[in-house]
């Protein structure tokens, strides 16, 4: 059960590719918060309106949430690598941090405005979580839907480009004996023909290599980093590093799938799809266009 939960939390998730995308999300959430506080007034907020004005209260609370989330955008600047490969677990962690921060902001607003002496820190945190979850869910659904439409459209185009790339004849080398090439690997006695190679996955200092031997799926672990593997096998134009942990053989990609989090490559029905990391998407598209 624990492993299943970890696997779910590691699933790719639409994140914040840049500051523009982040602030669009912040603006959308703030607008939904304003509408909820203005017309629904949940959890008896109407009895604690600032200066007895519903819309003023909604505007101040929504503005406070906007300011707090805008300040939190500094994490995008301070930890850019952490935001590159976004997952569901990271999104939930950031959501928890955002709501805690907004709760502190609400508590400070209430203390300054003296809206209610009874509304303490605990209630402010409760309101931040109880009211903030719905706008987050609404905006996330719309964001998922938009990213999914864009990814499906792009995936359809890339599949056409993939077929064109795979239809090109392999290059011929000056020496006939060089036309049957093998991967350059660290373990002697194992010869993997380049046309049979599917992909390599990095796990620490080990490299898991997958290939086909007469239609039978094979795998082997090598003491090698993915950087070393890439350097040793740079002469093969069909090899592409689509993720910090994966190098794939473009000629063996059966299908490119699009989803809300980006793109995945299907290389074999018995293998899990390989993710194209967001930071590698543009390079992947250019590789298909060559």
Image (tube, grey):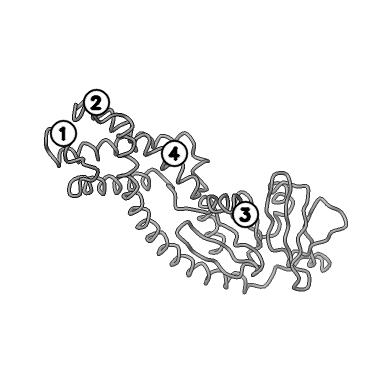
According to the image, label 1 marks what residue? Answer: 50
Q: Position of residue 127 (x, y in %)?
A: 30, 39
Dot 4 falls on a residue whose secondary structure is helix
Q: In whole angstroms, how far apart are the C-alphas of marks 4 and 3?
A: 24 Å
Q: Can you tell which quarter of the image residue 124 is in? A: top left
Q: Nearer the viewer, mark 1 or mark 4?
A: 1
Return the mark for residue 76: 4
According to the image, label 2 marks what residue? Answer: 111
Q: In whole angstroms, how far apart are the C-alphas of marks 1 and 2?
A: 11 Å
Query: Which quadrant: the C terminus?
Result: bottom right
**Dot 1 or dot 2, earlier in sequence:** 1
**Dot 2 or dot 3, earlier in sequence:** 2
Dot 2 falls on a residue whose secondary structure is helix
Q: In whole angstroms, how far apart are the C-alphas of marks 1 and 4?
A: 33 Å
Label 3 neighbour load within 10 Å: few <14, some 14-19, many 20+: many
**Dot 4 or dot 3, earlier in sequence:** 4
**Dot 1 or dot 3, earlier in sequence:** 1
Q: Nearer the viewer, mark 4 or mark 2?
A: 2
Question: 98 or 254, which is in the foreground?
Answer: 98
Q: Residue at x 21, y 41 (%)?
A: 44
| Disc 2 and disc 3 in contact, CB within 8 angstroms | no
**Dot 4 or dot 2, earlier in sequence:** 4
In the image, 148: left or right of 178?
left
Q: In whole angstroms, how far apart are the C-alphas of marks 2 and 3?
A: 53 Å
Q: Residue at x 29, y 49 (%)?
A: 28
In the image, 260: left or right of 131?
right
Q: Nearer the viewer, mark 2 or mark 3?
A: 2
Q: Nearer the viewer, mark 4 or mark 3?
A: 4
Question: 238 or 120, which is in the foreground?
Answer: 120
């Amino acid at each position: 059960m624990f492993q299943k939960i970890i696997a779910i939390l590691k699933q790719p998730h639409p994140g914040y590719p840049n500051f523009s995308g982040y602030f669009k999300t912040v603006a959308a959430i703030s607008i939904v918060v304003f509408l909820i506080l203005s017309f629904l007034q949940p959890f008896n907020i109407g009895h604690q309106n600032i200066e007895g004005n519903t819309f003023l209260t909604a505007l101040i609370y929504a503005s406070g949430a906007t300011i707090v989330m805008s300040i939190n955008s500094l994490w995008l600047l301070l930890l850019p690598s952490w935001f590159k490969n976004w997952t569901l677990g990271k999104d939930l962690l950031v959501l928890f941090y955002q709501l805690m921060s907004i709760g502190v902001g609400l508590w400070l607003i209430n203390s300054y405005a003296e809206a209610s002496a009874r509304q303490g820190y605990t209630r402010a945190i409760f309101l931040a979580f109880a009211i903030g979850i719905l706008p987050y869910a609404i905006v996330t659904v719309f964001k998922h839907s938009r990213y999914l439409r864009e990814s499906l459209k792009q995936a359809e185009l890339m599949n056409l480009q993939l077929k064109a790339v795979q239809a090109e004849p392999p290059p011929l080398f000056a020496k006939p004996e060089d036309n049957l090439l093998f991967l350059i690997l660290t373990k002697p006695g194992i010869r993997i023909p380049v046309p049979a190679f599917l992909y390599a996955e990095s796990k620490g200092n080990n490299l898991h290599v997958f290939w086909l031997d007469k239609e039978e799926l094979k795998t082997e672990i090598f003491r090698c980093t993915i950087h070393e593997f890439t350097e040793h096998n740079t002469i093969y134009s069909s090899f592409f590093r689509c993720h910090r942990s994966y190098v794939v053989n473009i000629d063996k990609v059966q299908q490119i799938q699009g989803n809300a989090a980006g793109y995945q490559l299907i290389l074999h029905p018995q293998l899990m799809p390989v993710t194209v990391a967001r930071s590698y998407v543009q390079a992947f598209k250019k590789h298909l266009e060559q």
